[in-house]
Image (cartoon, rainbow, N blue to C red):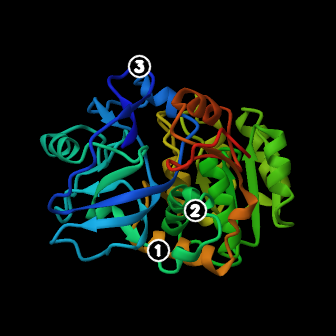
């Protein structure tokens, strides 16, 4: 079969012929139907987003069809349409260690251990391929997905679930006001769409890409936008003026920003008892005022990836039409030119997604 192989960090992805995946205990072989190529994929291959156990087939999250399962796998069966979350845990109660199969990212304290190294060795390869061997824990069946009209759009599901998990951690309820920091990125866009689907009364989209902010504002009258300046006081005032004052939830999806000023501008708009959720992955330390945090009974939560319950809840919202993936602009690529596909992905943000369809021989399309 054909696959995108990363031989070592610092080298581009290569299209290679690889052996078919061999079924083994605890696993299932899937046909990869569609997989999102994140905008930072090219950067990741050069090692700036963490280490990888090269050589490996790269790829994070996909929609697939189960072809065969091991004798000890009961959660999915051949023929199921599934989402591969790539999140694999050790299962140790209270201290589970986690990895992202075929991608960077280690859960918990983020440090490699003997356990995570062994997990990565046993479950090494990702899903940028025609077929993939997946650990049973990463696969969730999607009831009713076998007749979904456009399987490409479902490639965005894993990202939507990461955003949804953050909102779940904040206990978002219908009628809540939400501020999304980094709303013009793909994770931030997911947070906007999920917040709307869950009945938010107001969503303040905060970001730097004014064109994408305008597109988000056109989706729903409940969305207002703020263009970040980088100045905490100015941005906090702009968020307040846009309807974010006394926000129930502020969700940070900004990623590796050079300063915490935008995050703190969001924090400044929390209502008493409100919640700040950190999802984006900033490497900056956040100076939180002890007295203010205590007396206003604020909550600061971290959120990483998504639980099975959240994944299924998002799928049900999509299937019911509450979360409309038609808002996304999908650019389709095949396996034949990894460099072109990764370069295209690097130009995308917000509502634009590059989706790999391994069985397609088509050139990139919109």
Residue 268 in sight from this viewpoint:
no
Q: Position of residue 234 (x, y in %)?
A: 79, 38
As drawn, the label of residue 142 is 1
Q: Position of residue 146 (x, y in %)?
A: 52, 75
- Position of 144 relative to 138 (above/below): below
Q: Do the residues under discs 1 and 3 have CB atoms within 8 angstroms?
A: no
Callout 2: helix, strand or loop?
helix
Residue sitting nearer the eye, 47 or 168: 47
Of callouts 1 and 2, the N-terminal one: 1
363 horizontally vs 9: left or right: right
Q: Is disc 3 surrounded by few (<14), some (14 to 19) or many (20+) residues within 10 Å?
A: few
C-alpha distance separating marks 1 and 3: 35 Å
Residue 250 in sight from this viewpoint:
yes
Callout 1: helix, strand or loop?
loop
Q: Is disc 1 surrounded by few (<14), some (14 to 19) or many (20+) residues within 10 Å?
A: some
Q: Position of residue 181 (x, y in %)?
A: 66, 48
Callout 3: helix, strand or loop?
loop
Judging by the rendered image, the residue that carries numbered circle 3 is 11
C-alpha distance separating marks 3 and 2: 29 Å
Q: Do the residues under discs 3 and 2 have CB atoms within 8 angstroms?
A: no
Q: Do the residues under discs 1 and 2 have CB atoms within 8 angstroms?
A: yes
Of callouts 1 and 3, the N-terminal one: 3
186 horizontally vs 327: left or right: left
Judging by the rendered image, the residue that carries numbered circle 2 is 154
Q: Residue at x 40, y 73 (%)?
A: 80
34 horizontally vs 125: left or right: right
Of callouts 3 and 2, the N-terminal one: 3
Residue sitting nearer the eye, 12 or 149: 149
């Amino acid at each position: 079969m054909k696959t995108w192989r990363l031989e070592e960090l610092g080298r581009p992805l290569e299209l290679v012929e690889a052996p078919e995946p061999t079924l083994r205990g605890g696993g299932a072989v899937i046909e990869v139907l569609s997989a999102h190529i994140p905008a930072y994929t090219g950067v990741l291959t050069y090692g700036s987003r963490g280490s990888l156990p090269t050589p490996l087939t790269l790829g994070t999250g996909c929609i697939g069809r189960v072809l065969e399962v091991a004798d000890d796998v009961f959660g999915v069966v051949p023929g199921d349409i599934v989402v591969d979350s790539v999140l694999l845990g050790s299962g140790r109660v209270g201290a589970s260690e986690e990895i992202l199969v075929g991608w960077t990212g280690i859960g918990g304290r983020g440090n490699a251990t003997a356990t995570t190294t062994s997990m990565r060795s046993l479950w090494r390869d990702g899903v940028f391929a025609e077929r993939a061997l997946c650990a049973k824990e990463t696969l969730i069946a999607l009831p009713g997905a076998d007749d979904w009209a456009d399987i490409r759009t479902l490639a965005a599901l894993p990202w939507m679930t990461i955003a949804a998990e953050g909102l779940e951690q904040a206990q978002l309820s219908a009628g809540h006001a939400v501020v999304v920091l980094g709303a013009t990125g793909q994770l931030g866009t997911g947070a906007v769409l999920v917040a709307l689907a869950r009945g938010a009364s107001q969503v303040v989209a905060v970001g730097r890409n004014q064109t994408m902010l305008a597109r988000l504002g056109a989706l729903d009258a409940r969305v207002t936008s703020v263009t970040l300046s980088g100045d905490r006081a100015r941005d906090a005032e702009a968020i307040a003026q846009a309807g974010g004052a006394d926000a129930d939830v502020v969700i940070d999806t900004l990623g590796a920003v050079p300063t915490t000023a935008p995050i703190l501008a969001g924090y400044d708009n929390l209502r008493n008892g409100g919640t700040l959720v950190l999802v984006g992955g900033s490497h900056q330390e956040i100076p939180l005022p002890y007295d203010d945090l205590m007396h206003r009974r604020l909550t600061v939560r971290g959120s990483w990836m998504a639980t099975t319950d959240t994944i299924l809840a998002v799928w049900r919202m999509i299937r019911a039409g509450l979360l409309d993936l038609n808002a996304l602009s999908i650019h389709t690529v095949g396996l034949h030119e990894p460099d072109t596909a990764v370069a295209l992905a690097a130009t995308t943000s917000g509502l634009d997604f590059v989706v790999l369809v391994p069985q397609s021989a088509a050139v990139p399309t919109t």
